[in-house]
Image: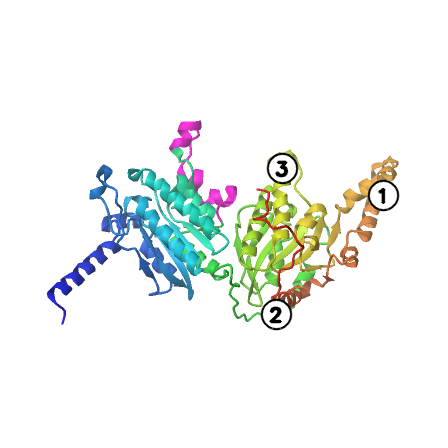
């Protein structure tokens, strides 16, 4: 039988527990709901497997005493941290609680986050950080800044070791933006979240520009203009669904392989519609998504950065249940050309996939690099070099399908044999050359063309020379004869061939030429 003292203490714990669960209080929770936002605990409940959340540091509170802070506190200090399972796999979850002081970050708030991240690193499990904070807690002064620095340091220590996913589900301003920026994937919620270094009032005071929070740093802005956001959700629930789906493609850490799932999609399924997908006109567009959908396990493609740099496609999919990293040119947008933004998009995705043991599957239809002073002055040389570096550095299985155009330096950059691709196939429609046939013909037969004065006759002669160049050089068989392509295949057989190749490459071991010992290479940034 329990003594009176024990019963009293248990009752006290129950009351404290109830207080902690309320965060900033019922009124603050109602205000959160009125904004269309869930609370930190409601978000966690939706994210994790039922009953799996093991909370830590529930009774942490801040130590500040200045500016009335000794009378203003709650258990947990505006952040909920713990370990849970998501889809049956462990993860560390961090959720800021906007109901107390706007989720502002102080010394102990940051210490809880850092402790959770350290645990994720020691256990080799992903970090999911649900951001909803007004920023640094100014009442705690430099201790708040120290807290941000500690978090950034842990973001870097965890980089390439465990997957890090940030969801911006409210304000994220000032120094707070750098933690999501250092993480692997960012999800933003439309209409309730924004992210920027300096807010609208500072912008107006500094340069006279008048914008609101969402025009400055809303989800759609970052999804289409800055490329800072990987996924945009309509509300908190959709954001959490995205996180769950994304985690299903990722290994728990860099020492594991991504999960393999059973599929009802036959590995040898023929795709006859692919035989008709590339137009006869070499300059006519078509949709690369249709190629990918025909090749991948049905319904498995998850696109990353769908709204930014749309001339390139990046994401995850599955081949016979195995996860693959997808990189592709999109002929339907800017002819699939490589430019500054698409180069950054591709390089970032490749480096993540290589760090976490995900094979890279590349679909190529690229006419070259974007010309013009804007691109050259913006640093297309440096940004384009990132793609070369990322592919060369990657040691995971690399498979490439050349669908149509593969010209010049862009041919080399897009997962070619010359950058270490393990298996390269081409469709009969592939054109592999230093440049497009018409441009090449104009250079090679310049004198013959200049000698013809009649424009119509000159055009006919150019068409003849163009076709001659195409038949001799702009086809997959010249490259295949050199061993630069492993096979020329019928489009309808692409899925079957790639499934076999991926299976054969599943035990790939790193084989590199000898290089002197070094800390790390110096990727162009």
Placement of 324 over or under 371, stated as above or below = below
Front disc: 2 or 1: 2
Q: In this view, does 287 lie to the left or right of 111?
A: right
- Kindly identify which residue carries mark 2: 267
Residue 116 within the segment the image draws in magenta: no
Q: Who's the residue at 34% across and 41% down the image?
A: 144
Mark 1 lies on a secondary structure that is helix
Q: Which of marks 2 and 1 is nearer the N terminus?
A: 2
Q: Residue furthest front?
A: 517
Q: Give the range drawn in magenta.
A: 201-229
Residue 220 within the segment the image draws in magenta: yes
Mark 2 lies on a secondary structure that is loop
The quarter holding residue 396 reads bottom right
Q: Where is residue 430 in the image (x, y as percent from the top left)?
A: 73, 55
The quarter holding residue 141 reads top left
Along the line of sight, the residue nearer the viewer: 85 or 462: 85
Q: Where is residue 303 in the image (x, y as percent from the top left)?
A: 53, 54
- Kindly identify which residue carries mark 1: 461
Q: Which of marks 2 and 3 is nearer the N terminus?
A: 2
- Kindly identify which residue carries mark 3: 375
Front disc: 1 or 3: 3
Asked if the residue under mark 1 is in contact with the one under mark 2, i.e. CB atoms within 8 Å, the reply is no
Q: Where is residue 145 in the image (x, y as percent from the top left)?
A: 36, 40
Question: Magenta segment, principal secondary structure?
Answer: helix
């Amino acid at each position: 039988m329990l003594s009176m003292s024990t019963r009293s203490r248990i009752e006290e714990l129950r009351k404290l527990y109830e207080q902690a669960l309320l965060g900033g209080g019922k009124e603050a929770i109602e205000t959160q709901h009125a904004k269309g936002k869930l609370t930190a605990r409601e978000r966690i409940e939706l994210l994790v497997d039922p009953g799996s959340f093991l909370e830590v540091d529930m009774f942490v509170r801040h130590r500040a005493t200045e500016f009335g802070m000794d009378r203003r506190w709650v258990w947990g200090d505006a952040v909920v941290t713990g370990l849970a399972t998501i889809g049956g796999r462990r993860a560390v979850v961090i959720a800021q609680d906007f109901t107390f002081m706007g989720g502002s970050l102080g010394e102990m708030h940051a210490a809880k986050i850092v402790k959770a991240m350290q645990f994720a690193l020691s256990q080799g499990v992903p970090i999911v950080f649900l951001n909803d904070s007004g920023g640094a807690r100014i009442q705690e002064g430099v201790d708040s800044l120290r807290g941000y620095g500690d978090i950034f340091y842990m973001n870097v220590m965890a980089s390439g070791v465990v997957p890090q996913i940030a969801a911006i589900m409210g304000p994220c301003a000032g120094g707070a933006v750098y933690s999501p920026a250092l993480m692997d994937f960012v999800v933003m919620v439309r209409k309730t979240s924004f992210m920027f270094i300096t807010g609208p009032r500072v912008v107006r005071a500094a340069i006279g520009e008048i914008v609101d929070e969402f025009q400055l740093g809303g989800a759609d802005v970052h999804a289409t203009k800055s490329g800072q956001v990987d996924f945009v959700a309509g509300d908190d629930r959709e954001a959490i669904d995205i996180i769950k789906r994304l985690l299903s493609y990722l290994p728990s850490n860099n020492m594991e392989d991504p999960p393999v799932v059973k599929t009802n999609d036959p590995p040898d399924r023929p795709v006859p519609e692919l035989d008709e997908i590339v137009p006869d006109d070499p300059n006519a567009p078509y949709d690369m998504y249709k190629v990918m959908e025909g090749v991948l396990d049905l319904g498995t493609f998850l696109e990353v950065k769908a709204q930014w740099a749309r001339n390139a496609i990046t994401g995850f999919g599955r081949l016979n249940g195995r996860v693959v990293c997808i990189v592709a040119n999109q002929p339907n947008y800017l002819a699939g050309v490589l430019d500054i933004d698409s180069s950054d998009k591709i390089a970032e995705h490749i480096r993540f996939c290589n760090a976490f043991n995900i094979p890279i599957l590349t679909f190529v239809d690229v006419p070259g690099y974007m010309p013009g002073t804007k691109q050259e002055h913006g640093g297309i040389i440096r940004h384009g070099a990132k793609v070369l570096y990322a592919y060369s550095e990657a040691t995971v299985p690399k498979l490439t399908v050349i669908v149509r155009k593969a010209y010049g330096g862009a041919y080399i950059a897009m997962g070619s044999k010359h950058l270490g691709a393990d298996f390269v196939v081409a469709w009969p429609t592939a054109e592999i050359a230093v440049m497009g046939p018409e441009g090449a013909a104009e250079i090679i037969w310049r004198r013959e063309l200049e000698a013809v004065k009649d424009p119509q006759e000159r055009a006919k002669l150019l068409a003849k020379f163009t076709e001659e160049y195409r038949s001799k050089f702009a086809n997959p068989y010249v490259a295949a004869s050199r061993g630069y392509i492993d096979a020329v295949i019928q489009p309808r057989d692409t899925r079957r061939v790639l499934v076999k190749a991926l299976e054969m490459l599943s035990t790939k071991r790193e084989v590199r030429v000898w290089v002197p010992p070094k800390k790390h290479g110096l990727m162009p940034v």
